[in-house]
Amino acid sequence: MGAVKISVSEEKLNIAMLSVHSCPIGRIGSKDTGGMSIYIRELSAELGKQGHHVDVFTRAHDPTDSEIREVGQGVRLIHLRAGEVKDIRKTMVYSYLDDFASNLEDFRQSRGLSYDLIHSHYWLSGCVGRLMKELWQVPQMMMFHTLGVVKNATGIGEDEADIRIERELRMVKDCDRIIAATERERDDLINYYHTSPGRVAVVPCGVDLELFHRIDKELARCYLGLDERPTILFVGRIEALKGIDDLLRAMACLKDCERLRLMVVGGDEHSQPELGRLRKLAFSLDIGNSVDFIGMVDQQELPYYYNAADVCVIPSYYESFGLVALESLACGTPIVATRVGIIESLFKYHNAGYIVDDHEPAHLAEGIISVLSNPGLCAEIAKESRAMVASFGWMDVARDINKQYQVMLGCREVLPC
Ligand code: UDP
């Protein structure tokens, strides 16, 4: 078929980045679009800057989107048809994966392209990647972002379907290299999915250190039109695993809670039923007037929220990484968090606020009070926290992922993780 390489130079790679269900330029903070989209967007941009060519393939979901969009130096976003061109729940996407794979192959053939490797994100893209790997005879890197078995073990929210677990188990065996975002995720892959340790490398996610920076608190509050009340912040998708119920119950445990404000950032029109339930819960706990459900906020505006807040709470039951923790610390705001994702390792080396051992609202409340009532600690964290996150720039992430591409392609020996 006379495939042509697009390589900028011999050592530069042509990468097929698969993000089937979630568009990297989609509405971040909506029901199914969050940290993974940021990850793919930022990683691809950095790989592009480093001279690689990245085609990011996602499901066409908006009829006004063009098929191909240049999104950065060397990076194209390609919308492929798979099911109706509209937003659909990610649980529906599985039935369109064969269409997606066949349209991906048509796209490649019609343009005479070839790829050096496939980088799949989440199990749905993993399924497509596995098909393409066979067809193209190139290696596949897998990043799960969340794992079905671990999610089910939390007992929170709806159980993940058996097909997801079955497919994940198969992918772990068949793919060529796995990236875990934390040591914990690597352990989960070993313990629950029986992956051999040598096949998994730990490469943490990143944070945009230019965007997320310190802004004077009063200025940030003034920008958002906030009054003097001490402010507690939650940022994230609105879903059961994020533990927002516990945060509301923790607020209700706080003495004089009417003197405080909780801002809940995140959620789009598809999150309305859950947001409605949370609003009702807040009123039934008698804290309705202290909680503002802000909805989805553009990332460019988020630094104002982190800087306006006195503490950012991450009450999650499961995070594969937890970008919000890094973003808050990059803005100098302490966190109160459960032991999820990167948080445990952050607290191993730094005092970033308060770590809570369980999901007891009273313990979360204890954490919030211990931070709010300790201005000395807050000032110290504000001073030190940039250094805590300095090694998490996206350029470093891309450099480390590229090293793992080289290992996978057999150009390098396996590096210690
Ligand atoms: N986010 C956003 N606007 C919102 C809510 C969240 O831009 O209204 C972003 C937030 O800045 C973070 C990401 O969504 O970068 C959430 O990532 P995280 O790893 O914390 O959670 P995930 O979505 O992966 O569960």
Image (cartoon, rainbow, N blue to C red):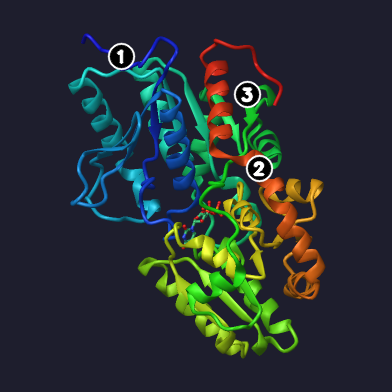
Image quadrant in which you'd find residue 260: bottom right
Find the distance from the CA under tag 1 to the CA under tag 2: 36 Å
Q: Which residue is mark 2?
A: 390
Q: Is residue 411 above or below residue 13?
A: above
Question: The N terminus appears in which quarter of the rendering?
Answer: top left
Residue 339 appears left or right of 209 = right
Q: Which residue is mark 3?
A: 199
Q: Which mark sits nearer the N-terminus, 2 or 3?
A: 3
Find the distance from the CA under tag 3 to the CA under tag 1: 28 Å
Q: Amino acid at mark 3?
A: Arg
What residue is drawn where x is 27% and y is 50%? 61
Q: Secondary structure at mark 2?
A: helix
Q: Which mark sits nearer the N-terminus, 3 or 1?
A: 1
Q: Amino acid at mark 1?
A: Lys
Q: Where is residue 294 shown, x and y percent of the image?
A: 47, 74
Q: Would you say the beta carbon of the disc 2 residue lies within 8 angstroms of ligand 1? A: no
Q: Is residue 79 above or below residue 292?
A: above
What residue is drawn where x is 39% and y is 19%? 134
Q: Where is residue 84 shown, x and y percent of the image?
A: 22, 50
Q: Where is residue 229 shown, x and y percent of the image?
A: 63, 83
Residue 365 appears left or right of 59 = right
Q: Determine crowd level at label 2: few under 14, some 14-19, many 20+ residues with C-alpha closer than 10 A.
A: few
